[in-house]
Amino acid sequence: MAMNMIQFQSGLSLPEFLELYGTEAKCRRALYRWRWPAGFRCPACGGRHRSSFRRGGQTLYQCRACQHQTTLISGTLLASTKLPLTTWLLAIYLLTSTKTNLAALELKRHLGVCYRTAWRLKHKIMQAMAEQEKSRQLSGFVQIDDAYLGGERNGGKPGRGSENKQPFLIAVSTDAALQHPTFAVIEPVRAFDNASLADWVQRRLAPEAEAFTDGLGCFRRIEVAGHAHTVLQTGGGRAATEVDGARWVNVLLSNLKRALDGVYHAIRQSKYAGRYLAEAAYRFNRRFKLRRMAGQLAADLMGCKPCPERLLRAASNSVH
């Protein structure tokens, strides 16, 4: 069997990571570059010139044009954190270097923090992933499937009507020969109905995209939106992963469910499914860049607005 070059690519080893980000000073220099890659920019007026001084144990930067004061992490997802920057960077490294996902409980043990802190770290990092993936559109040949996250509760509604199930759509774009996947979108939807599908198609499919789906009725909205649409026949005992035009979306869906079931034993689908699904999409879409993924994710966190714990816990899967 031929070696899978994606799985066997060299990532960033732990010794290399510690050499790059093993101290607070190294983390601070890296975060400065990620936040202001072209040099300091005042968040208030965009000024490029600043002075710096120490106060209360932290470094403040003052814009020489408007006198606005800021810190390295203010206005970002790391704002107001009490944790060392080395802990943040290590959490990012652990969440991007493992082949499978990492639950907050295991993150707690690796970092030596309490569970609540680990949960907050995990969800802030996933929030950054979700914000990076929310505007992605798929082009070319796109394989699409419907699925559910979660299972039936004892005494609850059975089947698709279960209140513990979160519907979501998974889509994978491929090359013209349908042989190699490129990018993926994995997103919760309100329901598998015409309104939800019309909204999803408008946001997620590029104008020239051609879709391949099964016979679910609401997928007709793809044609109404002007996209070429091929309905696949997946019955007759043939494995879904072998059907032309559906192989990659089913491979990714199978891997996703296996990873979620094996790592996360208690996901609140009604609130947090969007983040967990975005985490899977983020990792898949950057699978060729393992060495750079931790640094890229840290830069993404520096570009996101603050999200305190009350907002993290008030999340929903509503799609706007």
Image (cartoon, rainbow, N blue to C red):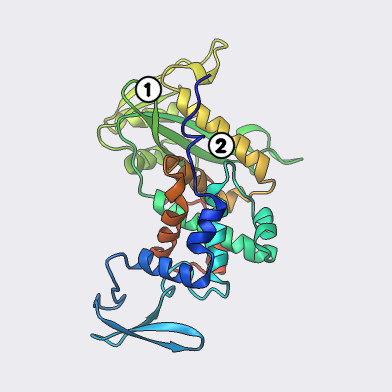
Q: Amino acid at mark 2?
A: Leu
Which residue is under mark 2? 256
- Name the residue located 53 percent from the left edge and 32 percent from the top edge: 253
Residue 54 is drawn in which quadrant?
Answer: bottom left
Front residue (pair 226, 2) = 2
- Name the residue located 48 percent from the left edge and 44 percent from the top edge: 283
One can see residue 42 in this view: yes
Mark 2, Cα crowd under 10 Å, few <14 / some 14-19 / many 20+, is: some
- Name the residue located 51 percent from the left edge and 27 percent from the top edge: 250
Asked whether the residues under the numbered discs 1 and 2 touch, taking CB atoms below 8 Å apart as contact, a structural biologist would say no
Q: Is residue 163 above or below residue 130?
A: above
Q: Is residue 229 above or below residue 296?
A: above
Front residue (pair 17, 299) = 17
Numbered disc 2: secondary structure: helix
Numbered disc 1: secondary structure: loop
Give the percent coordinates (x, y) of residue 26.
47, 68
- Name the residue located 62 percent from the left edge and 35 percent from the top edge: 258
